Image: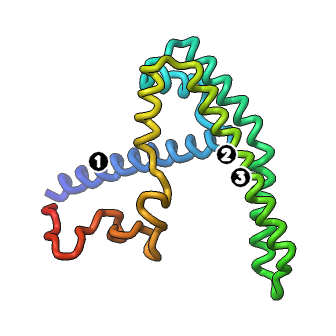
Amino acid sequence: MRKGWTILLVISLAFNVGIVSIIGYRMAERKKWMREGGPPRDVRENFMQKNLGLSKEQAGEIDDIFKETQKEILPFIKELDKNRKEIFALVKEEKIDESKKERLLAEMSRLQMEIEKRMLNNIIETRSKMTAAQRGKLEKMFNGQPRGFAEEGPPDLEGGRPGESPAGRRRPPSGEPRPPR
């Protein structure tokens, strides 16, 4: 009996170590992708071909547009990061220099606008390489993305959105029964 439990515990431990290793590897891979401007070209191309029905040539052209946009926005991202660090340093000071704060915030807004402008141009140029059916699929993909505060309001103090429980599940409006689990 004791030997059976030992074998079961060893198998369970091996399974858990395997799962944790896979999760850790994927997280590290995603972090690496973010540092390098996104997933490798073949991953992006395969994704676009599969989900949008692009030809290999279209996927390559669109990937070139993506990489060019990443090069364009990188200096803005670095400058934005530098300004954020200055803002955080400013907050730690005993007396905050209001003019410096306003200057940094204005510069951060300008940088963010430049990033958004280039990303919008990226989407416009990407769409120009697609057929009408492919543009429809792209639009459906965009419609599936979160819209930020516009539709649901800002997060509440517990990290969720209004109407959500702290675990992220929707709470029914008052008076309605909770759905079964």
Disc 3 and disc 2 in contact, CB within 8 angstroms: yes
Of marks 1 and 2, which one's residue comes earlier in the chain? Answer: 1
Local crowd at mark 3 within 10 Å, few (<14), some, or many (≥20)? some
Distance Cα–Cα, label 3 vs label 2: 6 Å
Which residue bears the numbered disc 2? 116
The circle on residue 11 is: 1
Q: CA distance from mark 1 to mark 2?
A: 50 Å
Contact between labelled residues 1 and 3, with CB atoms less than 8 Å apart: no
Of 151 and 80, which appears nearest the observer? Answer: 151
For image coordinates 63% across by 18% down, the residue present is 61
For image coordinates 60% across by 26% down, the residue present is 126
Tell me the amino acid under the disc marked 3. Answer: Gln
Crowd class of label 2 (few under 14; some 14 to 19; many from 20; radius 10 Å): few
Q: Amino acid at mark 2?
A: Glu
Q: Name the spot of residue 123 as percent of width and height, x first.
A: 60, 33
Q: Quadrant of residue 28?
A: top right
- In this view, 128 is above or below 78: above
Query: Which quadrant, please, contains the N terminus?
Result: bottom left
Colouring scheme applied when the structure was drawn: rainbow
Residue that numbered label 3 is attached to: 112
